């Protein structure tokens, strides 16, 4: 495959009829180099598109069969696809592989959200404690009164 071509567009394959999934390929609508990140660039945006793509299973199947080394296919980088190929060869279905990846992603997202919520609670508690301490301190009440007048 030529670098820069979107995963779901313009692929050639001996069984061309097996490429009907490309009609549903979301990456062809998004465009850009998103699916071919350079070294060090984030792959998260492309993976997020793949997570919403109806062609994800056949796209991943294609990439594993074709051993296409470049770019993000089915929401996975080349490095991860090598591991997935072994799991799939050992009998795990692509649907299960994708479901496990989604579950891990949403668990990570939920954990980060909970961490942010906890941090927010801690900041609010610290602010309330500081406000209460300031209110009970006559000096600071005086300072507040002076500021107000
Ligand atoms: S799963 Fe991702 S790479 Fe594959 S067709 Fe869909 S958007 Fe393109």
Image (cartoon, helix red, strand yellow):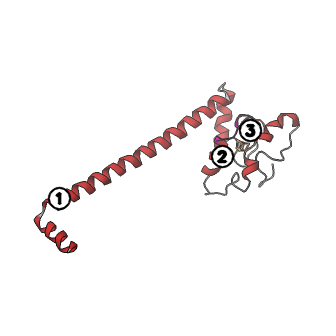
Is the CB atom of the residue marked by disc 2 within 8 angstroms of ligand 1's nearest atom?
A: yes
The quarter of the picture where the C terminus appears is bottom left
Find residue 133 and name its label: 1
Looking at the rendered image, the disc whose residue lies closer to the viewer, 3 or 2, is 2
Residue 11 in the image: above or below residue 97: below
81 in the magenta segment? no
- Magenta span: 51-56
Nearer-the-camera pick, 139 or 100: 139
How many discs mark residues in the rendered view? 3
Image spot of residue 39 (x, y percent): 64, 57
Are there few (<14), some (14-19), or many (20+) residues within 10 Å of tag 2? some
Image spot of residue 45 (x, y percent): 62, 51
Instruction: Name the image quarter holding residue 137.
Output: bottom left
Q: Considering the whole magenta stretch, tell me its main secondary structure.
A: loop
Image spot of residue 18 (x, y percent): 83, 34
* Residue drawn at the location 26% of the way across and 55% of the way down: 126
Spatial separation of the CA atoms under disc 3 and disc 2: 13 Å
Are there few (<14), some (14-19), or many (20+) residues within 10 Å of tag 3? many
> Disc 1 on helix, strand or loop?
helix
Horizontal arrangement in the rendering, residue 148 relative to residue 98 (left or right): left
Taking the image as drawn, is residue 65 in sight? Answer: yes
Taking the image as drawn, is residue 15 in sight? Answer: no
Q: Earlier in the sequence, mark 3 or mark 2?
A: 2
Q: Residue furthest front?
A: 149
Looking at the rendered image, the disc whose residue lies closer to the viewer, 1 or 3, is 1
Is the CB atom of the residue marked by disc 3 within 8 angstroms of ligand 1's nearest atom?
A: yes
Q: Earlier in the sequence, mark 2 or mark 1?
A: 2
Q: Earlier in the sequence, mark 1 or mark 3?
A: 3
């Amino acid at each position: 495959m030529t670098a820069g071509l979107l995963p779901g567009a313009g692929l050639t394959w001996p069984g061309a009829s097996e490429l009907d999934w490309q009609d549903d390929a979301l990456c062809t609508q998004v465009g850009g180099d998103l699916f071919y990140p350079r070294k060090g660039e984030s792959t998260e945006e492309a993976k997020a598109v793949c997570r919403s793509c109806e062609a994800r299973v056949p796209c991943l199947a294609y990439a594993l069969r074709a051993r296409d080394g470049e770019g993000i296919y089915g929401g996975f980088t080349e490095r991860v696809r090598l591991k997935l190929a072994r799991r799939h060869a050992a009998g795990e279905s692509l649907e299960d592989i994708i479901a496990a990846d989604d579950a891990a992603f949403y668990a990570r997202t939920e954990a980060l959200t909970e961490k942010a919520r906890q941090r927010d609670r801690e900041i609010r508690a610290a602010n309330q404690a500081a406000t209460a301490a300031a209110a009970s301190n006559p000096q600071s009440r005086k300072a507040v009164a002076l500021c107000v007048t």
